[in-house]
């Protein structure tokens, strides 16, 4: 099992690496060439810019029981079909019960934006968000290790 990070605009890259290191898990960072991110204890994959290029490169490296850190519902949905796990930057663990409604919500927001309506952006990140991510990520790692 390994950890893959969809790193473009990911606020928990360093926290993910710190936790993964304590669990002795490999970490792979995927980003485009406009956001090159290098860290100790992680292997970085730089992908050429293009629509969803990073997502598809990351997905091609996902195996059963891997964990993907992403805020992209579409990528999370594809990860789940590979019997792997996905978690967002706030600690939400994507699963077969919540992914459909998240995708539908994203679709409806896109329709509103296309019609000229404004939708809310993400709220400012807090220390509680980091705490929630840390707790959920550690729990996920422990549960997978029990298998």
Image (tube, helix red, strand yellow):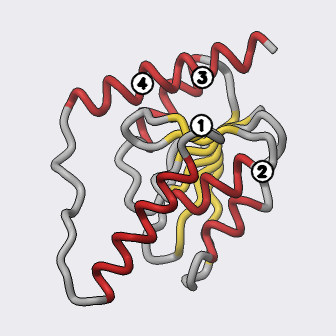
Q: Residues within 10 Å of mark 3 (few under 14, many from 20)?
A: some
User: Which part of the image, by quadrant, shows the N terminus?
Assistant: top right
Q: Which residue is mark 1?
A: 41
* Helix, strand or loop at mark 3: helix
Mark 1 or mark 2, which is nearer the start of the sequence?
1
Mark 3 or mark 2, which is nearer the start of the sequence?
2
* Helix, strand or loop at mark 1: loop
Q: Quadrant of residue 147?
A: top right
Q: Which of 16/147 is in front?
A: 147
Image point (78%, 34%), residue name: 65
Left or right: residue 33 versus residue 131 is: right
Q: Which of 68/79 is in front?
A: 79
Which x, y percent locates residue 2? 72, 36
**How far apart, in angstroms, are the residues tagged by discs 2 and 4?**
24 Å
Q: Which of 28/80 is in front?
A: 80
- Kindly indicate whether the residue at mark 3 contacts the one at mark 4 (C-beta within 8 angstroms): no
Q: Nearer the viewer, mark 2 or mark 1?
A: 2
Q: Which label sits on residue 140?
A: 3
Q: Quadrant of residue 107?
A: bottom left
Q: Which label sits on residue 81?
A: 2
Image point (48%, 27%), residue name: 18
Mark 1 or mark 3, which is nearer the start of the sequence?
1
Left or right: residue 4 versus residue 36 is: right
Which x, y percent locates residue 145? 74, 15
Name above or below for residue 124 compared with residue 50. Answer: above
Q: Nearer the viewer, mark 4 or mark 3?
A: 3
Q: Nearer the viewer, mark 4 or mark 1?
A: 4
Q: Which of 82/107 is in front?
A: 107
**How far apart, in angstroms, are the residues tagged by discs 2 and 1?**
28 Å
Q: Nearer the viewer, mark 2 or mark 3?
A: 2
Image point (40%, 52%), residue name: 10
Mark 1 or mark 4, which is nearer the start of the sequence?
1
């Amino acid at each position: 099992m390994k950890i893959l990070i969809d790193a473009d605009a990911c606020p928990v890259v360093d926290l993910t690496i710190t936790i993964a290191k304590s669990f002795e898990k490999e970490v792979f960072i995927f980003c485009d060439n406009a956001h090159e991110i290098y860290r100790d204890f992680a292997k970085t994959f730089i992908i050429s810019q293009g629509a969803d290029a990073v997502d598809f490169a990351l997905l091609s490296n996902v195996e059963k029981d891997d964990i993907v850190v992403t805020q992209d519902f579409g990528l999370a949905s594809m990860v789940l079909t590979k019997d792997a796990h996905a978690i967002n930057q706030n600690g939400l663990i994507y699963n077969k019960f919540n992914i459909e409604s998240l995708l539908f919500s994203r679709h409806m927001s896109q329709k509103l934006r296309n019609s000229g309506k404004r939708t809310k952006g993400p709220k400012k990140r807090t220390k509680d968000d980091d705490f929630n991510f840390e707790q959920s990520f550690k729990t996920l790692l422990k549960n997978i290790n029990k298998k």
